[in-house]
């Protein structure tokens, strides 16, 4: 019974943390006056603390099954890079005024589809595709379209970041050319939504490949949990801290580090890292991907929607079809994961069929 309780608690932790990730990161970005790279740096720092330093200390004190391997390190670093690109995609989608209310449900609806197709490709199981799986894909597409069409049309009062967008491109006195520009300031409505869609798709793709890639790294390290997690943290540190800092040396990005923005952005990164750790712990307590991931991907967008809508005070702006689309996206994502084609099991050694006697 204790094992079951620990399993359910781990799933809930992952579901909750990944559900609040988008809304918390949006608050951090707004607190930094619309900056995109500075919140990303905070996410990388949070991952470094939780996914690198803490596991290293644990390995030194307690040890763990498994071992380091070059193949496992490469795959795990690739998984971390995919996760970091996904985090950047979320920040850029928010930079073009995408709202976590609909961006995150679309990500959590699309990522399982990408995850499933990549797994099918690696396991060569396309021939096992069934009608229920196809129905799940259709549900995700229809639900995603419904969420976009009936998204909230009237957002909260403009933030300081949005006010900056309106004036950032005005020339100062004397006719000097402005040296700062906020992303999306001069974009038309169609262009802006095109960029929101692009970066949302980028996140769905990146987070979709994250799981299968990390699993390959884990298997190459003989089932170790902490070693692949450390590699993920290293990738986040390189892509979300080192590279953005080098960019900021050459490019004066709008916005600035503030105490409030830094705290919220660190909290967003911590939520992402703790959610990933929750998945690992669920597997350690006997959970299987076939039901752990559907529960997480199904519950996270619900948590996200509740937090985002409450945060923005948009309950009165939500159309019933928005909720219907959200439910359809969740149902489709769960259907895709549960009814994904499974590779045929390999016959155990020694169970070979006897060869026919020659005539």
Image (cartoon, grey):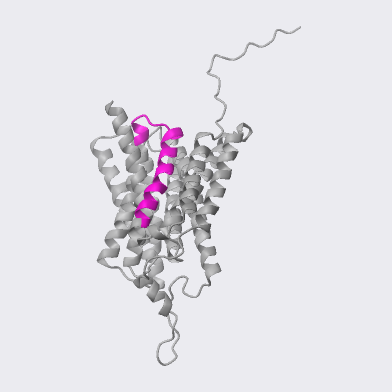
Q: As displayed, is residue 267 above or below residue 280?
A: below
Give the vertical position of 68 relative to 36 (above or below): above
Asked whether residue 195 is drawn in magenta, I would say no
Task: Name the spot of residue 238 as percent of width and height, x first.
Answer: 39, 56
User: In the rendered image, is residue 180 in sight?
Assistant: no
Q: Nearer the viewer, residue 352 or 332?
A: 332
Q: Is residue 79 above or below residue 286?
A: below
Residue 73 location in percent, x, y? Answer: 42, 43
- Residue drawn at x 55%, y 42% as measured from the top left: 118
Q: Position of residue 265 (x, y in %)?
A: 32, 59
Residue extending farthest to the left is 61
| The furthest residue to the bottom | 174
Which residue is nearer to you in this view: 121 or 73?
Answer: 121
Q: How many marks?
A: 0
Residue at horizontal 33 percent and vertical 31 percent from the top: 285
Magenta: main secondary structure: helix
**Residue 214, how many percent across, how many down?**
44, 41
Give the quarter of the figure containing the C terminus. Answer: top right
Q: Tell which of 181 and 77 is nearer to you.
A: 181
* Observer-nearest of 251 and 282: 282
Q: Residue furthest right?
A: 359
In the image, the segment drawn in magenta is 282-309
């Amino acid at each position: 019974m204790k094992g079951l309780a620990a399993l359910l608690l781990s799933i809930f932790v992952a579901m909750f943390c990944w559900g609040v990730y988008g809304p918390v990161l949006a608050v951090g970005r707004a607190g930094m006056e619309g900056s995109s790279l500075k919140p990303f740096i905070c996410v990388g720092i949070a991952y470094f603390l939780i996914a690198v330093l803490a596991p290293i200390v644990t390995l030194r004190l307690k040890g763990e099954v498994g071992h380091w391997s070059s193949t496992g390190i490469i795959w795990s670093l690739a998984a971390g890079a995919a996760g970091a690109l996904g985090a950047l995609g979320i920040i850029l989608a928010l930079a073009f005024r995408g709202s976590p209310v609909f961006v995150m449900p679309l990500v959590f609806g699309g990522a399982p589809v990408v995850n499933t197709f990549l797994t099918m490709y690696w396991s060569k199981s396309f021939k096992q595709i069934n009608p229920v799986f196809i129905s799940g894909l259709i549900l995700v597409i229809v639900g995603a379209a419904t969420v976009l069409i009936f998204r909230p049309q009237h957002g909260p009062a403009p933030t300081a970041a949005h006010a900056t967008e309106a004036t950032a491109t005005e020339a100062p006195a004397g006719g000097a050319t402005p040296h700062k520009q906020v992303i999306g300031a001069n974009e038309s409505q169609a262009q802006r939504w095109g960029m929101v869609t692009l970066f949302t798709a980028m996140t769905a793709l990146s987070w979709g490949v994250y799981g299968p890639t990390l699993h390959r790294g884990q298997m190459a390290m003989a089932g170790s949990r902490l070693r692949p997690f450390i590699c993920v943290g290293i990738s986040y540190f390189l892509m979300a801290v080192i590279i953005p800092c080098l960019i900021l040396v050459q490019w004066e990005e709008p916005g600035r580090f503030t105490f409030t923005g830094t705290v919220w952005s660190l909290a967003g990164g911590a939520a992402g890292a703790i959610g990933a750790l929750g998945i690992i712990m669920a597997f350690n307590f006997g959970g299987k991907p076939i039901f752990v991931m559907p529960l997480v991907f199904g519950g996270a967008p619900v948590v996200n929607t509740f937090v985002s809508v409450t945060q923005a005070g948009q309950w009165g702006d939500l159309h019933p079809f928005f909720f219907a689309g959200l439910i359809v996206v969740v149902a489709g994502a769960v259907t895709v994961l549960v009814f994904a084609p499974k590779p045929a099991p390999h016959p155990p050694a020694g169970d070979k069929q006897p060869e026919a006697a020659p005539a």
